[in-house]
Amino acid sequence: MKNTSSTGKLGEDLACDYLKSKGVRIFARNYLAKIGEIDIVAIDRYKTLVFVEVKTLKSGNSAIRLADGYIAGLLPEDNLTRSKLKKLSRICEIFVAKNPDLIKEEKGWRIDLVAISLDENLKPKFEHYENLF
């Protein structure tokens, strides 16, 4: 397994634990559609369907050298681009069309991002962004 895929798997496992601690019920993981994947499909404590994108970076992988020689740190959330978010939204629409019974009309659905920074000891720091799209 490549380092990035093992980091991603670890991040998804940590995100599931984090979300469960917030009263979220995990419905599915790694939902595949023809055009891509949803990391986590969940139902929050208010019964809203939530699609969760997980972005994870280890501390050693989060720095880049800029042209002027300075080093800048990247955050995991920097890896969720506008085009990736738009694609994720299309995948969510496919999921919803196939699973309309999971939608509570008054609640709808949303896309969240759980960004995880891992230090050198793999201790996670979470940032949870709700309702991105």
Image (cartoon, grey):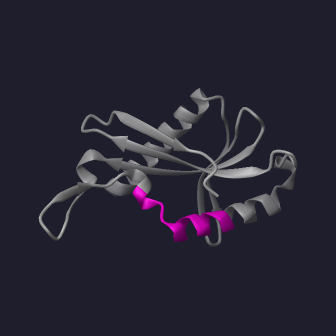
Q: Image check: 108 left or right of 79?
A: right
Region in magenta: 78-90
Q: Is residue 88 magenta?
A: yes
Q: Residue 6's spot in the image, x, y percent?
A: 38, 50
Q: In which quarter of the image is residue 125?
A: top left
Q: Quadrant of the N terminus?
A: bottom left
Number of numbered discs visible in the structure rendering: 0
Q: Can see residue 54?
A: yes
26, above or below 3, in the image: above
Give the side of residue 9 with respect to residue 113, left or right: left
Depth check: give the residue in front, 26 or 103: 103
Q: Which residue lies furthest to the left in this view?
A: 69
Q: In this view, does 107 lie to the left or right of 11?
A: right
Q: Is the magenta stretch mostly helix, strand or loop?
A: helix
99 vs 62, left or right, is right
Say above or below: 20 vs 85.
above
Residue at the image position 86 percent from the left and 46 percent from the top: 106
| Residue 83 pos. (x, y %) | 53, 71
Find residue 43 and report its image quarter: top right
Residue 1 shows up from this direction: no
Residue that appears at 36% across and 43% down? 117
Query: Which residue is depicted at the point 60% across and 69% down?
Result: 87
Percent coordinates x, y for residue 126 in the rendering: 44, 38
- Quarter of the C terminus within the rendering: bottom right
Asked if 77 appears above or below 19 in the picture, the reply is: below
Decide which of 66, 125 is in the foreground and name it: 66
In this view, which residue lies farthest toward the front? Answer: 68
Identity of the residue drawn at 58% across and 35% down: 19
In magenta stretch: residue 81: yes
